[in-house]
Image (cartoon, rainbow, N blue to C red):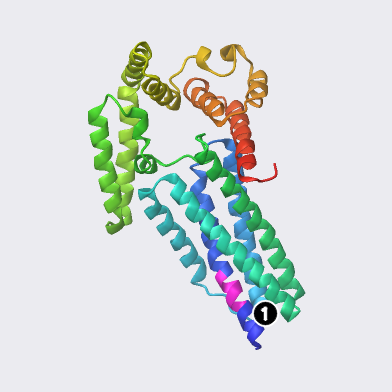
């Protein structure tokens, strides 16, 4: 076996492992999808990754390599470990590690393409080109999702309950509930120590955090909204524009705004079709964010939310220089 063939086999083995991990990561992200459209896209991505893993394995066998039966298990285990430990970090950190994985897959696929050229392996080159195209598209998608997050709008993926805690979502309940703030701090400490606990222990922490989030939301939502409105009124009266803006921003994040505060006139009277059309005319991430939060809190129309998400993605693509 030539040195080039051995190198090809080694790269194909590495790509199988990484692609198995990619598939499992995509499947864990499905539950974080904000809209049905994103959920379908992630499901398709996971299925495509599984198909690519099989194609890579076939090429590996064709070159005389023996697929490692442990590799799929290791790939899945890597994804589980990644999903577990990333909970202690904000969602954007999890997405950045996803992006690192895709860049590694893209770089290895590019390297494989050149190797195949040098070895005259046409079938391997065709596979490598397919992999390059697939991972280039995923890199672009993740870059746009991160840009949506950076622009302040609700990204295509929502954080898990524990990631919300780790990411400081307590800003939405900043004042006046000291009890909630203290509880959040305790939850963060628990999550940070999860690295030394078993998976069962971590799952228990996640479940408690989720239950806590739901309980706090139900118990304090009304009082929190009223307190923020009152704080905004007082700040306006005293001429403190910064404090008023902060209180309003917190209300908007909670979806606690009235229809007449939305950037779309007569929003509550619009049909789904008219609301979708109006959403597509919004030009700032802030306005889109306000509408999405309001829609999710008060109406929960999936078509409107998906249209708003698509418009936000278009702004994010423009911000990072990606062709729409």
Does residue 3 sit above or below 170 in this rendering?
below
Quarter holding the C terminus is: top right
Residue range highlighted in magenta: 9-14
Does residue 81 sit above or below 171 in this rendering?
below
Instruction: State the residue at coordinates (31%, 57%).
Output: 195
On whether residue 278 falls in the magenta region, the answer is no
Q: Nearer the viewer, residue 179 or 71?
A: 179
| Residue 12 percent across, percent down from the top left | 61, 72
| Residue 32 percent across, percent down from the top left | 49, 42
Instruction: State the residue at coordinates (76%, 79%).
Output: 120
Element type at mark 1? loop
Does residue 278 sit above or below 12 in this rendering?
above
Would you identify the image quadrant in which residue 301 lies?
Answer: top right
Instruction: Identify the residue under disc 1.
Output: 63
Residue sitting farthest toward the front: 239
| Residue 161 percent across, percent down from the top left | 38, 40
Instruction: State the residue at coordinates (47%, 23%).
Output: 297
| Residue 307 percent across, percent down from the top left | 63, 30
């Amino acid at each position: 076996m030539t040195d080039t063939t051995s190198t090809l086999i080694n790269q194909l083995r590495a790509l199988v492992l990484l692609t198995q991990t990619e598939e499992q990561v995509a499947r864990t992200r499905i539950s974080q999808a904000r809209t049905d459209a994103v959920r379908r896209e992630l499901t398709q991505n996971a299925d495509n990754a599984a198909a690519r893993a099989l194609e890579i394995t076939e090429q590996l066998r064709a070159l005389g390599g023996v697929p490692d039966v442990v590799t799929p298990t290791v790939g899945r285990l890597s994804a589980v470990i990644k999903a577990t430990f990333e909970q202690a970090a904000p969602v954007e950190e999890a997405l950045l590690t996803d992006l690192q994985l895709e860049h590694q897959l893209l770089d290895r696929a590019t390297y494989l393409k050149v190797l195949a050229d040098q070895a005259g392996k046409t079938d391997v080159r065709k596979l490598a080109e397919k992999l390059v195209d697939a991972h280039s598209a995923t890199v672009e998608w993740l870059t746009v999702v991160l840009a949506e997050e950076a622009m302040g709008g609700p990204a295509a993926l929502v954080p898990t309950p524990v990631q919300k805690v780790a990411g400081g979502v307590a800003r939405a309940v900043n004042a006046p509930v000291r009890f909630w703030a203290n509880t959040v701090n305790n939850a963060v400490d628990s999550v940070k120590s999860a690295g030394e606990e078993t998976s069962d222990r971590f799952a228990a922490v996640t479940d408690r955090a989720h239950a806590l989030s739901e309980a706090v939301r139900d118990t304090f939502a009304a009082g929190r909204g009223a307190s923020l409105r009152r704080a905004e009124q007082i700040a306006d009266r005293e001429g403190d524009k910064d404090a008023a803006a902060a209180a309003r921003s917190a209300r908007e994040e909670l979806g606690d705004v009235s229809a007449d505060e939305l950037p779309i006139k007569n929003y509550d009277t619009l049909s789904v079709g008219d609301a979708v059309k109006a959403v597509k005319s919004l030009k700032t991430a802030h306005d889109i964010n306000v509408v999405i939060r309001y829609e999710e809190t008060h109406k929960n129309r999936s078509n409107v939310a998906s249209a708003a998400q698509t418009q936000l993605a278009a702004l994010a693509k423009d911000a990072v220089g990606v062709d729409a």
